[in-house]
Structure formats: structure tokens, C-alpha cells
Amino acid sequence: MTKKITVEQALVSPRALAGGGDPAWITVPLHRAGGWSHGHDPLQPRVLLSSPDQRMLLRLEPAPDDLMWWSVHHPRTATGPAWSAAFGARTPVEIIAGFTDALIQPHAAQAGSAPYAPLAERGWTPLRHVSGFASPDSLTKIDQAPHKSSAGWVVTTLEQRNGPPPLWRARFSGHTPPYLVAGFTRALADPSPLARNPLHLPSAVVRSRITRHEVPADEVARALEQRVQQLTVASEPAAGTTPQAPRVPPPHRRTR
């Protein structure tokens, strides 16, 4: 009997301290399940994805001097103002995916559109004097800018209380649809740990809880493909609606 090949994974909790992870966790589902298109510029270390209606643009542009590597922009339209969202390099991709998955599945996501509701449900504490919440360990907080000129949500995660510069930040402009912010906060408040390569854990790991375990290598390799399939099925039009043309992009064979 052939012995299964296993690999070691580190399960990191709280998930806000897990580090960035594999960008493909976001970009591949947007492309394959959401129909977002991309150009081809192999000489640039960046990713640009456009929504099917060509209105939204996701940009991933690694820049050592810029704290915000991820950004999503939606222009002003006849029915609504412009909005944008940005995420730091060390924001876990699984948490950003709460936002981008809601872009693919807007009707399902809008069922729970209150940004702070997922946090209150998970025992986060309301901030004093401002509109916002803090995580149980006080390392992550989200608040809403009080001034109309800068209204929006800001999420900050520290490596330690009252410590050095933030581990990561996320910003949502004031006109960002609340259900998209709620998708992010729901993923942020999720108590389940995130899996990471034990050899590439961030420095903040010293303040997190780590559990190491062995998992089948093929299970790790299939994780992204399974995620794409689940989102594709969930994003299919309901019975009685006009289906979109099928998307048949080439398979992506990247492991997390």
C-alpha cells in the first residue's frame, strides 16, 4: 500500500496575525468564478483585474515603500458615488477574500449588510467615544471616521498592545457598500485559525497561538481548486434567470 505524502502546516490564531498568505486565494476565484478579466504584462510585478462590467478594478502592486498593496476602485456612476478599498501587504488573504467574495456574490452577501454585526456576534467590544469595535485581545480595531470629508472605515492590527507601527491596515471609503465591509468583518471575526507554511510565519507569530499538524499534500494542493468550484456554483444564476456565457479559463495549479 502506497503511503500518503503529508506536509506540515501551522494553524495560526488569531487569524489577523497569520500574515498575508497566497494572493491566488483572491485573484484566481475572481477570475475563474467571478469572470474578472486580466491583462498580460509579464514584465511587471503586479496584477490588474477588471470586473465583468469593466467598472471595478482590483490592483495588487507590491511596493516596499507603500503600506497598501491591494486596492479595489469603483468609479462614480449615474446611480452612485465612487468608492474604494485598500489593504496592507500583511492583511491575510482569507480576510480580504471576505470582501472580494461579496463582489462575486452580491445578492447573498447583502443578506447581512451591517459591518459591525459580525464583530458583536463574536464578542468584540464597542469602542468608547467613537463608532467601532476592538477584538477580544485588543490587537485589532475597526472604527469609522467621524468627519464627512473622510468618512469610512479603518481597520488596524497591531503586533502588540500600544506597540510599534501596525502589522497591517485596511481602509474603506465612506461610500463603500456596507455589505462589502461586512464581508470583510465577518472573515476578520471568524475564530477559526488560518493555515500557513511553518517556514514562512510572520514575526507577529510570537503573540499568536500555533498548532502544527500533518495534512495530506494532495489536500493542500486541492484547496484552491475546491474554493473556486464552490464559489462558481454559488455564483450561478438562480432558476428562471438568464444564464451568462460559460467561463472556461485554464485550470490553475498553484498550491497555497
Image (tube, rainbow, N blue to C red):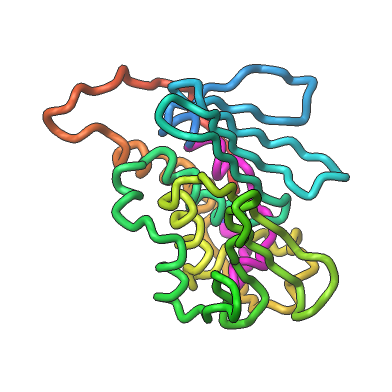
Of residue 172 and residue 199, the one placed in the foreground of this image is: 172
* Image quadrant occupied by the N terminus: bottom left
Q: Which residues are magenta?
A: 6-29
Of residue 76 and residue 4, the one placed in the foreground of this image is: 76
Write down the quadrant of residue 14 in the picture: bottom right
Q: Position of residue 53 (x, y in %)?
A: 44, 21
Compared to 153, does 25 lie above or below?
A: above
Compared to 165, does 4 lie above or below?
A: above
Identify the residue at the far right of this view: 65
The verdict on residue 27 being magenta is: yes
Of residue 36 and residue 29, the one placed in the foreground of this image is: 36
Q: Position of residue 71 (x, y in %)?
A: 64, 40
In the image: residue 124, left or right of residue 208: left
Q: Position of residue 165 (x, y in %)?
A: 83, 66
- Identify the residue at horizontal 43%, vertical 25% (top origin): 78
Q: Is residue 1 visible?
A: no
The verdict on residue 148 being magenta is: no
In the image: residue 38, left or right of residue 109: right
Q: Is residue 37 visible?
A: yes
Compared to 151, does 244 lie above or below?
A: above
- Identify the residue at horizontal 52%, vertical 79% (top origin): 126
Compared to 68, does 72 lie above or below?
A: above
- Identify the residue at horizontal 36%, vertical 42% (top origin): 106
Of residue 1 and residue 138, the one placed in the foreground of this image is: 138
Identify the residue at the far front of this view: 148
Q: Position of residue 198 (x, y in %)?
A: 70, 64
In the image: residue 71, left or right of residue 32: right
